[in-house]
Amino acid sequence: MGASGSGKSTVVALLQRFYDPTEGVVRIDGFDIKTLQLKWMREQIGVVSQDHALFGTSIKENIMFGKDNASMDEVISAAKAANADEFITQLPDGYETQIGDRGGLLSGGQKQRIAIARAIIRNPVILLLDEATSALDAESETLIQVSLDQVAAGRTTLVVAHKLTTVRGADLIAVLENGSVKEMGSHEDLMTKNNHYAKLINIQRQSSSQEHRQDLQDGVKTPEGRQYWSTKNSFNRLSIRSTPDLIASPLHFESILAVAPDENLSSTSFTRLLPLVSPEWKSSLLGCISAATFGAIQPIYALNIGGMISAFFATSSQQMQDRIRIYSLIFISLTFISMILNLIQHYSFAKMGERLMQRLRLRMLEKIFTFEPAWFDMEENSSGELCSRLSNEASTVKSIVSDRISLLVQTISGVLIAMVIGLLVAWKLALVMIAVQPLSVLCFYTKKVLLTSISRNYSYAQNRSSNIASEAVYNHKTVTSLGSTKKIIEIFDKAQDEARRKGKKAAWLAGFGMGSAQCLTFMTWALDFWYGGVLVQKGEISAGDVFKTFFVLVSTGKVIAEAGSMTSDLAKGSAAISSVFKILDRPSSQDNTNHGAKIDAITGRIELKNIDFYYPNRPSIPVLQQFSLDIKPGTSIGLVGTSGCGKSTVIALIQRFYDVEKGCVKIDGVDLREIDIKWYRKHTALVSQEPVVYSGSIRENILLGRPEAAEDEVVEAAKAANAHDFISAMENGYETECGERGVQLSGGQKQRLAIARAFLRNPVILLLDEVTSSLDSDSEQAVQEALAQIMASRKMTTVVVAHRLNTLKKLDRIAVIADGTVVETGSYDRLKNMGGQFSRLLHAHDLKS
């Protein structure tokens, strides 16, 4: 145990040999772990971390990541031990239920219970618990504590925790500070020393309820005191994306998970790209002129080939040499002209294509940000899928524009010039050859039509496998810890089976089309020479005219063949363009533009009146029913209740992440649907259980709250969130890079940055969603004091969601939610003495504290 950043998680990482120490050694049973077979060693270790890393497969497969060859009975037994079997069996597909991208269709507590089941089924020798029950409510946590206690029997168990009561019954407690062990001993020994550990204990005592706490020393002697597996009272909630509160009831997952490519995705005309490339009209025009000119060179070159051959039939050697010399000079000239035209053509189209790709990605991302959260709940719109579309489809469109359009212009130019030359040289032979050309074109067109129908499915299958790879890379530490690299590769390979099948089908169709085209080409050659011979016999044309016409129009067939070879690319490009414009054309159900009312002097009164709410993807499952709550401006209210009761839904509705079906949400008496949503959200701030930190500096992350803020305001916000000290201690201070998703910071440090970002916004409405769940006792106390000061000084309307009930004592009011409605409301003391729902929650909370 220890403060955030003290090195607790690093110890867990070293035990799993994610890193090797610079100096010193890590031993297991006396053996340096560097000498142990790595995969075997990790198979002996079970890990449950605060970051419950799940994969987008079924619940059963996620549990079986702990043990590949586990039987179904073992899976069910592990789920029961983790208190997960009950909610799993209520799902339509039970253990076969697909849980979505990173488990996005489950609530936080449900994901954590599956992670615990995954560790239990592993039957490890060493058990590492890193805030193992952090996402569970008091009732679920109490049940799981007993299971974890049983699982830990006879095993070496390492518990990482911020909440000190979690470790008070451990055989040995190590207090870490600044990367070293400051104290070590049992709870009694460390309390007797009255040093670091005792100081932390006293801080937490001060934040505990005086009426319900018991003496910590005496608590060790009780059975409850020995349940040292308990971690902090976080709540079973979900992220915005995962719409959490309803999986406790049976869900109609089929409508969500049976995601297939959009069969109604209409073909979008390439002409829709014209407005997007219009800023580069000069480059486009120059590229088209160069491509058209280069296309004309091919039939001219073919004409001279025919002339060169006829030169060998000259009556005198001098005449033959003169004609050959002229044709040679023409060929050299065409070479230099072709080189110059190619340079201009490719540069112009590449410039246009790169800027088009940049513009498409920017517009797609801007458009995606305007969509309502319900859109992101769909599996086909998961983060992996959207990133893949942003990357791949814009790149495909760019390839079509920069590479394929130039070839198309060349083809049209070459075909027209060739036909004109052929008709001028030998019009009868030319007409015959031109007449059979549509057969080849028809063959290539048929190929394109066939490929278009499978291109969308092929792209979708590729995106699915990309999504699995994205999850595996994101959760690489979990994959490594579980030794599941082989299993992940098998799942990834299985996901690619569909792509392979589509690819094989495309290959067969392409082969048939190309083979047919080649067959028709050879047939036209035979017809050309036969009919040309007939015309020569009749004296209508010379042998040289036959060669000239043949090579010119054969070059046309070659150009058409080259254009036909890109039909599969055009099919993919057409599907990509359709997919791009499907996003760009999609209207948002919430107007994110600067439309709607703006309240002159917003005070922050929140009214939720007679609300019935269902999540869009689950219209048959009611979340809130006749829900009413009136929050006065400048007051603070706490929302409490068991997991799945609707607390997170209320937070989402206040931010207008969703619109209600019945009833209304009002801000200062104005229906939220009539308010300018962008303006409104500038007056709100949310700090959630899972802090969001972006790649960039600490200062940049805080400034996301209010980009125009001055440096002094940034520092003030950091101080208010108890973040200034650890930031200043870093080598680069506020310019320190956070890394991707804030990997360079501890969980507590990331949470404090998120709090500072919210403070900087100076909001009228502040939404706190278990904000101190990742903080140690010192930091939690400081942040709670800062929150109290700011709420008192700034007169904000504050809504707090929490399971740690003693954090709600200073709030003006508490609302108890059960089954989607408010069942109790009042002050902390009043509800405690009522003997109702809140009193029972408080009793369950104190039993494990």
Image (spheres, rainbow, N blue to C red):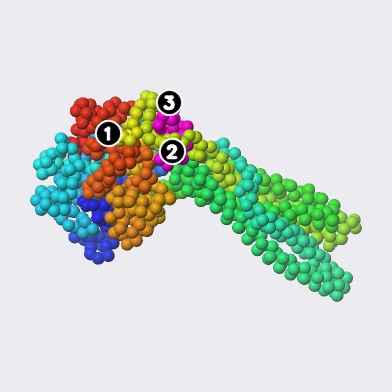
Write the start and end of the magenta stretch as one range. 658-683
Residue 580 vertical placement versus 821 (above, below): below
Residue corresponding to mark 1:
812
Apparent side of residue 607 relative to residue 775 in the rendered image (left or right) = right
Residue denoted by label 2: 680
Q: Residues within 10 Å of mark 2 (few under 14, many from 20)?
A: many
Give left or right: position of 679 versus 356: left
Callout 1 amino acid: Asp
Q: Could you say whether the residue bearing mark 3 is in a helix, strand or loop?
A: strand
Residue, x 15% and y 37% (percent of image)? Answer: 210
Marks counted in the figure total 3
Q: Position of residue 243 (x, y in %)?
A: 39, 36
The amino acid type, in three-letter code, at marker 3 is Lys
Q: Is residue 519 left or right of residue 632?
A: right
How far apart marks 1 and 2 lie (CA) works out to 24 Å
As helix, strand or loop, the secondary structure at mark 1 comes to loop
Closer to the camera, 450 or 360?
360
Dots 1 and 3: beta carbons under 8 Å? no
Residue type pointed to by label 2:
Tyr
Point out residue 837 in the picture as x, y percentages from the top left corner: 24, 28
At which x and y percent is residue 3?
Answer: 23, 52
Does the stretch in magenta take in 673?
A: yes
Of labels 2 and 3, the one closer to you: 2
Residue 420 vertical position relative to residue 91 in the rendered view, above or below: below
Which residue is disc 3 drawn over? Answer: 662
Cα distance, mark 1 to mark 3?
28 Å
Q: Nearer the viewer, residue 779 or 167?
A: 779
For residue 116, say whether it is visible: no
Residue 391 in view of the camera: yes
Towards the viewer: 306 or 683 = 683
